[in-house]
Amino acid sequence: MEEEEEEKVMEEKETVVESLVENVEKYTATTLELAKLKSVLKTSDALSNIAVSVILMLMTFMTIIFLSVGGAIWIGELIGSLYCGFLIIAGFYALIGLIAYLMRIRMIKNPISSALINHFID
């Protein structure tokens, strides 16, 4: 009788251990699936933000091009030399490019890096 009780207790312990192992496997699978879904969500969100940014940059670029050509023609007519108007606008953009190059780390790289890190951490 004592042996039967010991066998019964051992079987119950094995059942509990099997159940525990099964629950751990389910938990691990669920956690892995959740991590995959979170990464897909973050990636799709980042890609959609990039797509919107590219579209806005293209529209801004086109606007700047048309305003620059119009401004160059207007300045050229004011000073009587069309090509001088274009040279003045080109000099203005060269100055802006130089300033942007000198400030590239502080004004461009750091904010973009921070935004990407914050996006993927949150």
Image (cartoon, rainbow, N blue to C red):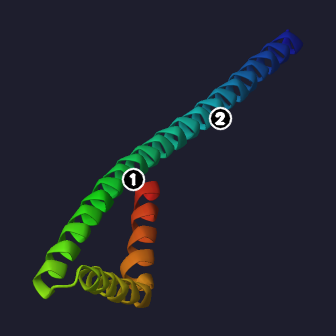
Residue lying at 32% horizontally and 87% vertically, measured from the top left: 91
Residue lying at 74% horizontally and 18% vertically, measured from the top left: 15
Q: On the rendered image, what quadrant is the C terminus found in?
A: bottom left
Q: Is residue 36 above or below residue 22?
A: below
- Callout in the foreground (1, 2): 1
Q: Secondary structure at mark 1?
A: helix
Seen in the image, is 107 located left or right of residue 24? Answer: left
Query: Is disc 2 surrounded by few (<14), some (14 to 19) or many (20+) residues within 10 Å?
Result: few
Q: Secondary structure at mark 2?
A: helix
Quarter of the view holding residue 109? bottom left
Question: What x and y, as percent, mark residue 105?
Answer: 45, 83
Residue lying at 59% horizontally and 32% vertically, measured from the top left: 33
Question: Residue lying farthest left?
Answer: 78
Question: What x and y, as percent, mark residue 121?
Answer: 45, 58
Q: Is residue 106 above or below residue 50?
A: below
Most foreground residue, 49 or 18: 49
Label for residue 94?
none
Q: Label 1 belongs to which residue?
A: 54
Question: Mark 1 is on which residue type?
Answer: Val
Marks 1 and 2, how far apart at CA: 39 Å
Figure label count: 2
Query: Is disc 1 surrounded by few (<14), some (14 to 19) or many (20+) residues within 10 Å?
Result: few
Which is nearer the N-term, disc 1 or disc 2? 2
Quarter of the view holding residue 34? top right
Most foreground residue, 96 or 28: 96
Seen in the image, is 60 located left or right of residue 19? Answer: left
Q: Is residue 2 above or below residue 26?
A: above
Question: What x and y, as percent, mark residue 24?
Answer: 67, 32
Label for residue 28?
2
Question: Mark 2 is on which residue type?
Answer: Thr
Seen in the image, is 100 located left or right of residue 11? Answer: left
Q: On the rendered image, what quadrant is the N terminus found in?
A: top right
